[in-house]
Image (cartoon, rainbow, N blue to C red):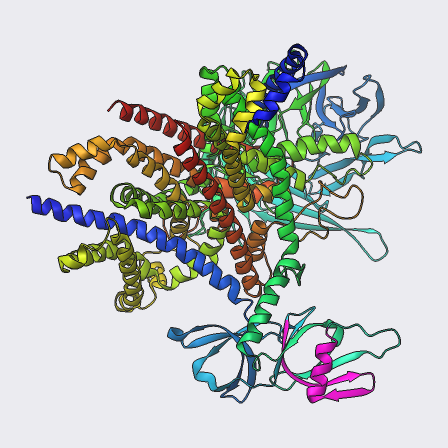
Amino acid sequence: MVRPEEQASSGSTRPIRTTSSRRLVLDRIAAILVRLGGAVVIAGILGILLFLLWEASPLFLPSSVKPLRSVSIKGARALSIDPYGELCLALTKKGLLQLFSWKDGKALDVFPPFPNWKQGEAPIVMSPSSPFFTLNVGEGKLAERSFQWKVTFDKQGKRIVRPSFEKVQVLSLDPKGGKLRAYSLARDSEGGLCVAAVTQNGKIRIFHRSFEENLFGDQEIADEVSDFDPGKGGVIQRLIIDSSRQNLYALREGGILQWWRLQENGTATKSLKLEMGEIRSAGLLFGERTLVLGDAEGRLQAFFPYRNQESGEWFFTKVHEFPKMPGGIRSFSISQRNKGFAVGDDLGNVGLYYLTTEKRDWIGRLGKGPITCLALGKKWDLLASATEEEARISEVDDPHPEASLHTFFGKVWYEDAEKPGYVWQSTGGTDEFEPKLSLVPLIFGTLKGTFFALLFAVPFGVLGAMFVSQFLHASYQAWIKPLIEIMASLPSVILGFLGAIWLAPILEDHLIAFLMMPVFLPIFLIASGFLGMRLPKRILRRFKVGSELFVFSLVLLLGIWICFLVGPLIASLFFGGDPVRWLSDHWKMTYEQRNAIVIGIVMGFAVIPIIFSIAEDAFSNVPKNLVSGARALGANLWQTVSRVVFPTAAPGVFSAVMIGFGRAIGETMIVLMATGNTPIMDPNPFNGFRTLSANIATEISEAPVGGTLYRTLFFAGLLLFLITFILNASADAVRHRLQKKVKNL
Amino acid sequence: MAKKQDKIGFSLTWLCAGSLGLCLVGVIGLLLLLGYQGLSGFWPKRVMELRLKDGSKALGELVRSQPEKHRFQLKIGNRDLYGLDFKWFNDQDVQERSWPKDVVRLEREEHGIFLGRLKALEIGKRILSGPEAWEFLQKNINGTPRKGQASMVLKLVDAAGTSKEIPLKAVLRAIHPNQMGFWKRLGLFFRRNLEFLTENPRESNTEGGVFPAIFGTILMVFLMTLFVTPLGVLAALYLREYSSGGWFVRSVRVAVNNLAGVPSIVFGIFGLGFFVYLLGGSLDSLFFSDRLPSPTFGTGGILWASLTLALLTIPVVIVATEEGLAAVPGIARQGSYALGATKFETMWKVVLPGAAPGILTGVILAIARAAGEVAPLMIVGMVKLAPDLPVDGQFPFIHLERKFMHLGFYIYDLGFQSPNVEASLPMVYATAFLLVVLVTILNLFAILVRNRLRRKYATSAV
């Protein structure tokens, strides 16, 4: 506080003027400092929102493709680019391979992949997925040659990238020399060659060549051949086989798409009528589970087989349809990293598509005339395209193709799934695993947990607050309120721990007792209340207003004890002694030890004090003259409370519930510890769930910075921020309006 | 009619009383449960010897019994011999229970406790036995043989008679649990409590103490207080005393109030993205580029954790400070101005001292919240076992980039990620109790300060 002698001394011993100017400067500086500090804090608070937005926004930003360089090259039919985007290998219609650098367009090498090839023969074909060329040599033979981009370093440590070619493989599919009508070739992960071909007699021949090193280090070739009958139907025009030799697709005359599941014993098959025009391109996307077809009118559709888990029956259907390209599909290339692909059309347009989002991430013109071939970079970062006249390399900026509002909130039909669904599964075992990022199961879990918590917390919080503010003697209030504040301050990690380690096993053992309580305890309380009324007036008069609280606490404990006593009896009478087993036998309900009821009790316990304190405020703010007026008019205590106090304070109670809701939505540790954390959508209260907040806590440490999962988790955080902020702000507004209203009463 | 109304009214009143009663029972019950479970782990228990019907014998401390299932669980210890610490026994298999006096209980550096009987003590070629051996053992506990001195080995047998040799230096404590009187037990109980508070954890956190976690929590909260107090007070001063009001300030106040309700995990990811990756990453590339790619500040650490918690708790401090500022009567300010003080002088000498209890309340509440908060810290800097404290004798003495241990995270980690959950439960309960006591004391203190503040102004304000 102000010390008078200091004031006096500064006033009397020094000349006022100089001190005054120094003081004024100090005052000015302090004002600036305070404003600055205030501004920094406020900016920091707003900064949180902005930062979350900034981290999450790339998920939804449009992608772009920026042409970098173009090189003049005539009649390119296939392209391949190295992982660094320095060089390009182009196959021309003359059957020559041209190796050139994007930097200056200088040709580094020109040579034929198959030396004896002559123009006019069957064309050389390059696979859209892995780098190899194939040639139908005729007489039942196929030639194959594959290459790899090899990276070496010279003496100065400079990087040199060159394609390295393997030997030409000649595969004799039909030793009798019959003509091959259609064929498809794939290379498996061990370098083996898988071929499916339609032989002269109309059978489909599956051929597999594997290379094994023998003891002397020489390569040994092992061929494996099997045939099967494709059955009746149109002539097979095109075949596509996957490298695991499990799925074979055929386009047959009359617009029929047929699929075979090639297995050791027998083949399952399904066929369907295409709603497409002339098929121009066909290819399997990364992971080889989905077939994408493009037709002459620019339509693009995706198909995959899936299996019914229960019956084991296979199905094959159209799963996705994509936005049409303006011109007919001309060229097609798949990503080696995700479920994306690129198509080029007759009008020089190129489109970048993503399978699961069914979205076209980008479309634009990359040349005059038809796009004859395309190649996507290894990291979904580069795109090479060519027209008859030139080849062009462009930079792809599409960091999060798998993210869209539809993947986050809509039903998505993922590969291998029976039907579209909401799935959260961010990481998987293999490279080909596609992250499934639906936030719906997490939101469902959040709401489920919140619902059960509020179911428990709202009645207790509101009724308890009503009791404290209206019925309890002031001398008791002084220590009950701090107790509730302590309840509010209990660390959630402790509540979660007790819920999981202490409560969950008890709940499992005494399920019936717990389920009895909500019915039995109120009845027991009221009954014992009426019994208590019978006590002589002499004794009753001794109690202060509200001291029934302590009596009822004891009564409550007695009631709980009775529940625990009776519970096992009921369990053995009606549920065969084991209600958990009974549930799964009769209702097919899974019982997880850490379930929604545990969460309801524990999180409810955390939310009660919040609801309590705000509701208590609202009840206490009801003007005393209203209460006295009601009492004076002859209303009893309860009538006053239910007809006067509660309606006046109702908006405040509502805002208390909203704030409790906000707290429950964001609670992390309790749900992290006391649920199974499985992201399933099951309304069953005996099953677990996973919430948005627990999901962030479990997954953020493993999410690569800047990746889709990382940003998705930030997006989830942003959602939480916005939901709670809006909830709290509107609760605040409700409360303020109430305060104003009450003031005017 | 009125009678019926009355009846409904009464029963609803009773329901209200019951609701509140359940809350009270819940809070008090929870505190008692934690207290009992937390402290009972330190109480030296008697060791029971079982003779089973199949003739085998077992020694163990009773952990819990389930009379309705006719079984009970013993902590049998001797993990190195049996591979597990706990075992269930059925009542029907037991022939006889006894509490033999000669059972010894050793706390060891590894493999948990040993329960059995002491046969002899070998000191080189000298062999002690009986009370002599026990005396020597008590005098030389955890003793390493001096140079040239022969090794000291305990020869023991377990309940089944399997012999076991344990070097004396691996023994941390030896007691005869069935010979101790109440006062001896009480003494050991307090000693164990003290060890819990002052020692490092052993055996992947299942034994020993939690000192590093206590230290980490306190240091982190202390750092956070350094950030949050000046900033919170400045912001509150600005909002209440220096700003010109208007819709902007009103909306900022609403924002600050609501920030308190934003889930802590959101602050956690903000801390991870902004402090750790953005700020920490840039610091690394500017000053610690020689250590890259292993990050220095670009990974979770105590500095980032305390900054994140400062952000989380700043609304608490702002709101409480504003309340404190508002409670300073206008007359005091006007008096100061009338005496010729500038605004700064009025703030510094009149308003802030008057608001000090409010500020203190805010800071204490912030500390209490920070001490119990785990979710944001999980992602910005805590580890289950930090080999080094963030403060040591090496320059620059306080290592803000280091990871640290925290009581709350310790509970989560030990209770859920530990390989031997059952064995670590007493530790978890004890830690939980410690944390609850800490947080509760802080809160009670804040409540006390606030009540005094209110009373003061209720009487002084005119």
Left or right of residue A544: residue A719: right
Residue A332 lies in quadrant: top right
Foreground: A294 or A444? A444
- Seen at 74% across and 31% down, the residue is B283
**Residue extending furthest left?**
B1
Residue B238 pos. (x, y %)? 54, 21
Residue A176 is one of the magenta-drawn residues: no
Residue A225 pos. (x, y %)? 65, 49
Foreground: B148 or A292? B148
Residue B264 pos. (x, y %)? 52, 38
Q: How many marks?
A: 0
Left or right of residue A79: residue A291: left
- For the question of whether residue A723 can be seen, the reply is yes
**Residue extending furthest front?**
A12
Q: In the displayed structure, would residue A156 be above or below residue B163?
A: above
The stretch in magenta equals B113-141
- For the question of whether residue A57 can be seen, the reply is no
- Seen at 55% across and 52% down, the residue is B412
Q: Quadrant of the C terminus of chain B?
A: top left
Residue A49 lies in quadrant: top right
Foreground: A569 or A443? A569
Residue B117 is one of the magenta-drawn residues: yes
